[in-house]
Amino acid sequence: MSQISQNEPEEVKVKADWLREFHRSTVGFCVNFGIAHFFGLIGLVLIAQGRVMTSTLIFAYILAEFASYSITIGCHRLFSHRTFKATRPLVNFLAVCNFFAGQQSIWLWSAWHRVHHKCVDTDEDPHNATRGFFYSHIGWLLTYDHQKFLKSLDKIDMSDLEKVPIIMFHERYYMYIHHTCIYILPTVIPWYFFAPPICGEINLMTHQ
Ligand SMILES: [Zn+2]
Ligand SMILES: [Zn+2]
């Protein structure tokens, strides 16, 4: 590889995709994490006040279940460790579910996890458990030295995942589709399909 091709693509990538890079940065993560938890807390208050329909709660529960399968079965067992062979429809299904999970793209999750297993409990382990419970649970994401970590990704072979079209699609459009999946769809779907027709009810009441 020539020197030019070693240095240039990195710079071009960062300039062209600053929003995507921001989303992956520590600050971007904290902003995203803060907003998601803020809405989560509002949701809890609404549930406590009895203002959330049972159908919406069931819908949210099903979404959360499939999102977690995309992490445990998908990102962990299948994409990081290749512990079983999956058909193309299952791979595609897990990738779609993963947009709802909010744990970064399949490529990045798997890269983090492969580095974790390769360098477990050292400084290069992204969630080095010897740094304590808080750090290995969430602190590593809140304080992450992103640039340092990107360098250690070079040591990890991700070529198997890079051959899978849906994984590269997921990687490229993750930020946009993920936000649609976690904020817009779960708001619009229950409102459109489950909510009683408010205007209709009011009309019915006034005509009685
Ligand atoms: Zn593992
Ligand atoms: Zn582990």
Image: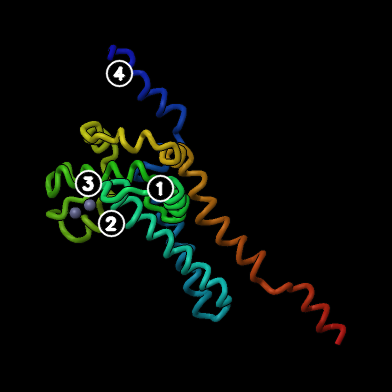
Residue at 29 percent of width and 12 percent of height: 2
Q: How far apart, in angstroms, are the residues tagged by discs 4 and 2? A: 33 Å
**Residue 48 as seen in the image, left or right of residue 147:** right
Q: CA distance from mark 4 to mark 3?
A: 25 Å
Q: According to the image, label 2 marks what residue?
A: 138
Q: Is residue 25 above or below residue 187?
A: above
State which quarter of the image contains the C terminus.
Answer: bottom right
Residue 62 in the image: above or below residue 17: below
For marks 1 and 4, give the CA distance.
Answer: 35 Å
Q: CA distance from mark 2 to mark 3?
A: 11 Å
How far apart are the two marked residues, 1 and 3, measured between alpha carbons?
A: 30 Å
- Residue at the far right: name it: 207
Which tag, 2 or 3, sits closer to the chain's start?
3
Residue position marked by numbered label 3 in the rendering = 126
Residue 125: % across, % down: 18, 45
Q: Amino acid at mark 3?
A: Pro
